[in-house]
Amino acid sequence: MKLLVIISSVVLTLSLTSCSVSKRTSSLNNLDSLWTSVTFGNHHAGLMLYDPDRKQTLYAHNAERYFVPASNTKLFTFYAGLKTLGDSVEALRYLVRNDSLIFWGTGDPTLLNVNVPSSKALEFLARRPEKLFYWPGHFPQRPFGSGWAWNDYEDYYQPEISALPVYGNVVRFLASDKLAINVIPQSFVLEKDTSRATFQVRRDWMSNQFTGTSGVVPAHFEQHVPFQTSSVLTTQLVSDTLHKRVTLLPSFSTKVYQSLSSISVDTLYKHMLQPSDNFVAEQILMLVCSKIEQPFQSKTAIDYVLKNHLTDLPDRPNWADGSGLSRYNLFTPRSIIRLLEKMYTEYPAERIFPLLAIGGQAGSIKNAYKSADGKPFIFAKTGSLSGVYNLSGYLLTKSGKTLLFSFMNNNFNRPTSEIRRDMERILTQIREKY
């Protein structure tokens, strides 16, 4: 087997576990001139290819250097969930005392979430005969993750983190006709504003005051705007939805409780990985905290996973959040490869691959990596921010090999579409010829 000669030059192959120089494998043809090309020559770029069956690095360029991973971070969050959460998502915990039922959140994001809905918690609370009390639990986590952009507070992709999310912690504004907007949940009010000609919903920075601009509401208009969370608001939203009284219980402590499950964890992982849902990713870290019986804090979950499951990474990452929204995140391509190898070794491909974005079929690469024979060959996670585009995952070659790859690009000042296009060309050529 022979890897296509894409661009010729001399290459030094880095081992998976160190920066030391080793001989390049006989199956590897040179790629080095790629890094002086028009597309990749003027920014921080890296690529690593690895054969997990032969445990051999096929190619490495800047594999030991740190990159902002963006949503490639979700691969680590995925692994954190795989190692800790079991088969189903814990919806909530509760305790019955006399005529009272005290319940609290576990971080489960599915309650009334239109994207990954589960009605089990709602149905459970609705049919209980006891008086309902909501306890916020131990929640030192700030609503925003470390290193998030503060002025994205009203953008759909950055809802606040909470112990018991309701409605995905966003308000949905839907066009009913050209004269009206439906607001879900109805607890929120949309006020009128005359400052913009094009219709848009805005939220005040420090409150849940929503304003709709004076333009005509377009047909099929839909906008999701995060709301400012609080224990009081959570209690109110649950009470309004159940149409029964729920009382906030500020202080409570117990080591005895019962649990209620909601959905399968794979349903949650799939929604995090394919459309790249930031909110679900952050809440998975909260679920990890709940599972290990620790206060809700992203850092607690991250430190636990690094200490107990990722001590063998070749380069310790700077792992700041669950979603990759933070530019504090820093990972090396070879650490991502090691993570992919661990998942490939520890879990069946039949389970892992369908949960990832699938070239030509599903998720953020649905419209790319289409093969002439219709068979998907890329199962991966994208990662994009301004000046950042990465793709890491599994590549199936025509000869039947499974390769692991991490292709990372930072600090470019050209259209992301150009980066994506040439990455697709290169990875497709590897698939065809290796």
Image (tube, rainbow, N blue to C red):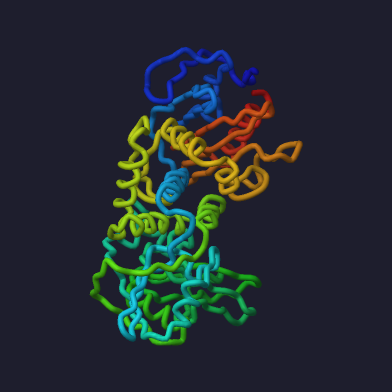
Q: Position of residue 234 (x, y in %)?
A: 38, 75
Between 399 and 378, the residue placed more toward the observer is 399
Would residue 306 be found to the left or right of residue 367 on screen?
A: left
Between 105 and 172, the residue placed more toward the observer is 105
Q: Which quarter of the rendered picture does the C terminus lie within?
A: top right
Place residue 132 in its image quadrant: bottom left
- Does any portion of residue 422 appear in the rendered image? yes
Q: Position of residue 260 (x, y in %)?
A: 44, 68
Between 432 and 159, the residue placed more toward the observer is 432
Q: Which quarter of the rendered picture does the N terminus lie within?
A: top right
Q: Residue at x 62, y 79 (%)?
A: 176
Q: Compared with residue 5, is residue 252 higher up or lower down, i.e. above or below?
A: below
Q: Residue at x 61, y 82 (%)?
A: 179
Q: Position of residue 217 (x, y in %)?
A: 60, 74
Place residue 177 in its image quadrant: bottom right
Q: Compared with residue 403, is residue 416 higher up or lower down, i.e. above or below?
A: below
Q: Residue at x 36, y 33 (%)?
A: 312
Would residue 199 be found to the left or right of residue 335 on screen?
A: right
